[in-house]
Image (tube, grey):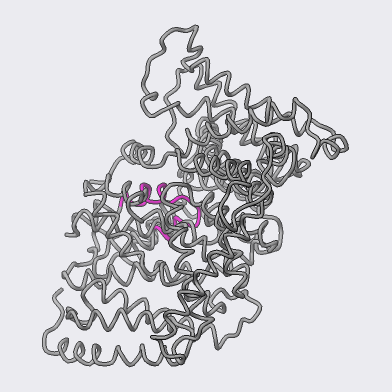
């Protein structure tokens, strides 16, 4: 039996700290609801009728976000169900301390936007006592708001960076710098657009919020259900049907949802029980859904918040980012699909019967109007207009379809709830983006990003020099080896960072610190940024903090750690793909040296390499694989994605003996099922 909506929501809140809200008393709930709706209406209006000046727009957004975080998120998880001690200490059921923190946050945030620009320009570098006090207050409440909404790791990282800025003269070796006083640090983080009010906050306030709101409304009007029906019709009839429905459904649902956990519980509430009924083990069913759902953050057109940050970091149109993401996103889902297919063939799992399949004609007859908002959003985006204007029209049409669709009409109460929930879901990413502004501000103040890049590339060059004595020059030269080791170290750091902080924050930090290291080795900026983005997303299925995997395990009744390990194995295609588009940039379609010949060579090598890796990890190709065949297939997969033609030919040669044995064996013993 499918999980009901309440159970799915409970699991989403359990494993996604960004929506772990506290229950509110009726009066407080109405007050907070009105404020959340006001925030949504502010962003909706400015998206359609013009943004406010940069500092004012960001200030209004951040004041709402921080003020509401203290009203919506409890001090700790134990604070969920604590009853009011007294109406004096907890007016409206919310602690007086939280009210004071909310008011202090609003005052501290709005101080800077209210300073006239001429006066602000004079005070940068010469902050007043009021500036320092309010700036220090904002840093404190921001760190606390971020801790409540996304956990401890990000605030701790921000504190470490601030300590580095102040104690620079005491740092060892190349990390030493002149240091900054507390007032100088606050001045840089508070009064300029290189700190808290920087690019990260600007992108959330200008782009991300609108698409979160669009995703909420698109789901409410039934577009997500239509996607799931389409996925079942396309993939359900084949071997292991529900697992493939999970993959296709997650890919389609990911087009309107940039959250791995939300994608997992929404699609998984239908697909995980179906997979278990068919015969999949609970941990494998959960892992399939988790691995598929992480692709939601890399699936065009909406992707995750990091995609909008690329617009500002790279100064590229959003259509370019979408185009670059198409092939890598396909490769991720293909990597999961091929392993699921081999698993189904190995165990003889059937597809869905005609009775279990949805009626696609009836589904479109019922829900076809829900496609209109997405089509219009894509049309506006591809016409060259701004992403927030595209989101404005998408939201507008979602509301119109919801109010006018006679088959599934939205009430005005549901409209209010959509505006409320859209703002609520965007609170955590807003607080995290502002905190990441602290880290970025320290990097620009101290220049530590270039120092870290130098350390990484120097270490990679030393490792390359050592390995060069063992590897023939025809397979990999010193430059390729240096780049390879730099990528490996960068990928490991991205995964480790992503284990504790949201993907958006991880991307900003790594784009500031790690991407320049790749740039020093000649990697194009868009390629470097996609690399760190993809590895940051991988953390959602990487133990020990695999949030998407743990959410899926809760739905399947499976062991969380076993689910995380299996999900990581299923997502290993995503580990290979970033290396492919670094060594073969044509795979991203938009690089400066793009050529169709290089694109198809990289595409074929990637598809064959991921297939070999899937066969090795699943233990099945045409028949069950032997141990020596698995070793050959893993080596072939690595060689096939390498940039040199010799390595690709060697990889292809390694596959031949495996294929010969499998073809002969398959003819003698047909595959069961």
Q: Is residue 461 visible?
A: yes
Number of dots carrying numbers: 0
Name the one closer to the observer, 74 or 401.
Answer: 74
Left or right placement of residue 169 versus residue 576 in this view:
right
Q: Is residue 258 magenta?
A: yes
Image quadrant holding the C terminus, namely bottom left
Where is residue 381 shown, x and y percent of the image?
65, 60
Q: Is residue 524 magenta?
A: no
Quadrant of res 612: bottom left
Magenta region, residue range: 250-270
Where is residue 8 shown, x and y percent of the image?
33, 41
Residue furthest right in the image: 118
Where is residue 538 shown, x and y percent of the image?
42, 59
Left or right placement of residue 452 versus residue 22 in this view:
right
Name the one closer to the observer, 196 or 341.
Answer: 196
Left or right placement of residue 352 versus residue 81 in this view:
left
Q: Is residue 651 above or below residue 559?
A: below
What residue is shown at x 59% (from left), y 33% (from top)?
65
Residue furthest left in the image: 669
Q: Is residue 329 above or below residue 435?
A: below
What residue is shown at x 19% (from left), y 90% (from top)?
661
Left or right placement of residue 397 versus residue 94 in this view:
right
Q: Main secondary structure of the magenta part?
A: helix
Q: Is residue 400 visible?
A: no
Name the one closer to the observer, 67 or 39.
Answer: 67
């Amino acid at each position: 039996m499918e999980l009901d909506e309440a159970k799915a929501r409970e699991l989403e809140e359990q494993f996604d700290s960004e929506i772990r809200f506290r229950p509110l008393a009726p009066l407080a709930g109405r007050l907070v609801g009105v404020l959340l709706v006001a925030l949504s209406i502010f962003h909706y209006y400015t998206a359609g009728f013009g943004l406010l000046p940069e500092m004012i727009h960001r200030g209004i957004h951040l004041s709402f976000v921080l003020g509401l975080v203290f009203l919506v998120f409890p001090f700790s998880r134990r604070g969920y169900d604590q009853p009011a001690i007294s109406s004096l200490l907890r007016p409206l059921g919310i602690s007086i301390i939280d009210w004071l923190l909310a008011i202090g946050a609003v005052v501290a945030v709005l101080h800077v936007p209210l300073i006239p620009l001429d006066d602000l320009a004079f005070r940068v570098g010469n902050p007043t006592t009021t500036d320092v006090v309010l700036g220090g207050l904002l840093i404190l409440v921001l760190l606390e708001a971020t801790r409540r909404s996304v956990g401890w790791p990000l605030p701790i990282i921000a504190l470490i960076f601030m300590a580095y800025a102040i104690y620079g003269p005491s740092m060892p070796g190349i990390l030493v710098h002149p240091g900054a006083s507390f007032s100088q640090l606050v001045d840089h983080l508070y009064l300029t657009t290189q700190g808290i009010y920087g690019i990260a906050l600007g992108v959330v306030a200008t782009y991300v919020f609108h698409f979160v709101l669009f995703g909420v409304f698109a789901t409410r009007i039934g577009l997500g259900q239509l996607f799931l029906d389409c996925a079942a019709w396309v993939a359900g009839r084949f071997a292991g049907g529900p697992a493939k429905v999970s993959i296709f459904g997650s890919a389609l649902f990911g087009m309107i949802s940039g959250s791995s956990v939300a994608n997992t519980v929404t699609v998984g509430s239908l697909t995980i029980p179906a997979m278990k009924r068919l015969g999949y083990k609970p941990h494998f069913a959960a892992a399939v859904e988790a691995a598929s759902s992480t692709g939601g953050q890399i699936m065009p057109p909406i992707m995750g918040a990091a995609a909008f940050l690329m617009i500002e970091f790279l100064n590229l149109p959003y259509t370019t980012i979408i185009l670059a993401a198409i092939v890598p996103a396909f490769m991720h889902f293909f990597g999961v699909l091929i392993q699921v297919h081999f698993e189904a063939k190995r165990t003889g799992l059937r597809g869905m019967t005609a009775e279990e399949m949805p009626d696609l004609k009836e589904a479109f007859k019922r829900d076809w109007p829900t496609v209109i908002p997405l089509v219009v959003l894509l049309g506006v985006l591809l016409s060259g207009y701004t992403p927030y204007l595209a989101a404005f029209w998408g939201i507008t049409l979602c509301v119109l379809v919801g109010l006018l669709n006679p088959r599934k009409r939205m009430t005005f109460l549901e409209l209010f709830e959509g505006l409320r929930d859209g703002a609520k879901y965007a609170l955590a990413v807003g607080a995290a983006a502002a905190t990441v502004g602290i880290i970025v501000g320290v990097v620009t103040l101290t220049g530590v990003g270039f120092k870290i890049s130098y350390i990484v590339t120097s270490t990679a060059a030393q490792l390359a020099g050592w390995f060069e004595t063992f590897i023939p020059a025809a397979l990999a030269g010193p430059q390729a080896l240096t780049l390879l080791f730099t990528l490996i170290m960068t990928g490991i750091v991205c995964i480790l960072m992503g284990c504790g902080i949201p993907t958006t924050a991880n991307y900003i930090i790594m784009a500031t610190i790690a991407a320049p290291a790749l740039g020093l080795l000649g990697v194009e900026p868009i390629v470097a940024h996609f690399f760190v983005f993809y590895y940051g997303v991988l953390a959602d299925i990487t133990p020990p903090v695999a949030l998407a995997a743990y959410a899926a395990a809760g739905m399947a009744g499976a062991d969380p750690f076993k689910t995380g390990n299996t999900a990581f194995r299923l997502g290993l295609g995503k580990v290979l793909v970033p290396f492919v588009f670094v060594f073969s940039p044509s795979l991203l379609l938009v690089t400066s040296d793009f050529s169709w010949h290089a694109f198809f060579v990289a595409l074929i090598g990637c598809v064959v390499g991921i297939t070999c890796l899937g066969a090795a990890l699943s233990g099945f190709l045409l028949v069950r694989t032997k141990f020596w065949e698995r070793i050959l297939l893993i080596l072939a997969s690595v060689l096939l994605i390498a940039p040199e033609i010799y390595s690709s030919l060697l990889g292809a040669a390694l596959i031949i003996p495996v294929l010969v044995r499998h073809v002969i064996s398959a003819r003698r013993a047909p595959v069961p099922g």
